[in-house]
Structure formats: structure tokens, C-alpha cells
Image (cartoon, rainbow, N blue to C red):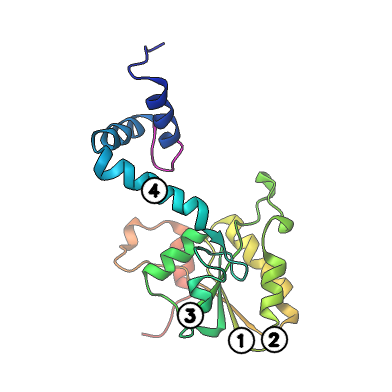
Amino acid sequence: MAASVAGPEIERLIQLLARLPGLGPRSARRAALHLIKKREALMTPLTAALQVAIEKIQVCKTCGNIDTQNPCTVCTDPRRDPSIIVVVADVADLWALERANATNGRYHVLGATLSPLDGVGPQDLTIDQLVARAHAPEVSEIILALNATVDGQTTAHYITDLLSEANVRVTRLAHGVPVGGELDYLDEGTLSAAMRQRTLF
């Protein structure tokens, strides 16, 4: 067993950093060392920012986004189209769509996708709230922006069945050749989807 080279406080910092996605033990050690070396410039402001986040960040009661206000900035933006609700599995997906400036609609965060193997069922997601929102008179389209995985597609089909009673159009993101993609590097499933969903040129 390797000997500890730092005190328990530093080891604790490394252990906590290693829990972050994308950081393993080695990267966590480098990050911790960098923070310690730049205590005044980085660690002190980071500590203050984390404390503010703990106190002020909350989950939006309307869509499930995270923000410092409730309802969130997206839900209260008057420039958003209230007739479109984009359904995503996670807040990270919402942020990705916003970075791409892909839609002017509002969002609904499910919290995950259905996954029987992981014990995630409909009761664990915000599907009931989505169905209630879909019945609002101003809503005309639900866009299912879910991952093209087995769990994502299962969730999409489940939601589509539940929305059959609502007076809304249910659409999903197109699947196929990505922008800048080369056919030779794509998997067979992506190529098949692209061929099935071909459009006029």
C-alpha cells in the first residue's frame, strides 16, 4: 500500500474531487495541487461560489431545470414559445440544446430515462407532470429530445402512448448522419436510420 504524502485534509479534497465526472484519482490529485497552489486566486472564490450554490440553487417547479430562481429563467422568458415543450432526460441535455441555440421552446426535464435494469420506473421520472403540461391549451407540440439509446427510445415510446389523449403533435429529434460526418466511420444503426429518414435535397 502506497504511503500517504499529504495530510488527511488534502487527501479528503482529492477524494472528493475524484468523485466528479471525468476526474480519476490522478486527475483529482493534479486538480487539488493546482487549487492549493492558487489558494487566493482559485480556492477562496471557488469555496464562496460553492456556498452560494448550496444556498440559492433550486429545481424549477415547472420544468425541472436548475436555477437560482423558481420558476427558472427559461420558464419565465417571455420570448419563449409556450406552444413547444422539449423533453430531455437531464439538465445537461437542456444546457446542450441551449448552447446550440437549437430551439425557442420551453423544456421539461424527466430526471433520467426508463431503465428496468437500473430500477428506474415511470414513478421515478416527472412523466405525470409532463402529461399534465401537454394538456394545457397553449401547448401544440412535444419534442422528444432523448438519447438514441434503448432506454431513451423506450422512454420515448412510453411517453408517446401516454400523450395519445392530448391534443398535441409528438415529434422526436432526427437520427442519422451528423454534420461533418463521414459515412465510412458511422455505425450500421446510424446509417440505417439516416437512410430511412432521408429527405428531399
Q: Which mark is residue 1?
A: none
Q: Kindly check if marks 4 and 2 are in contact, taking CB atoms under 8 A apart as contact.
A: no
Q: Kindly check if marks 2 and 1 are in contact, taking CB atoms under 8 A apart as contact.
A: yes
At label 3, which amino acid type do we have? Asp
Residue 80 position (above or below residue 37): below
Q: Crowdedness of circle 1 by 10 Å Cα count: few (<14), some, many (20+)?
A: some
Instruction: State the predominant SS element of the stretch in magenta.
Output: loop
Q: How far apart are marks 4 and 2 (CA)?
A: 47 Å
Q: Position of residue 53 (x, y in %)?
A: 46, 53
Q: Closer to us: mark 1 or mark 3?
A: 3
Q: Does the magenta stretch include residue 58?
A: no
Q: Closer to us: mark 2 or mark 3?
A: 3
Look at mark 4 in the image and give the residue it sits on: 48
Q: Distance between the residues labelled 3 and 4?
A: 28 Å
Q: Is mark 3 on a helix, strand or loop?
A: loop
Look at mark 1 in the image and give the residue it sits on: 140
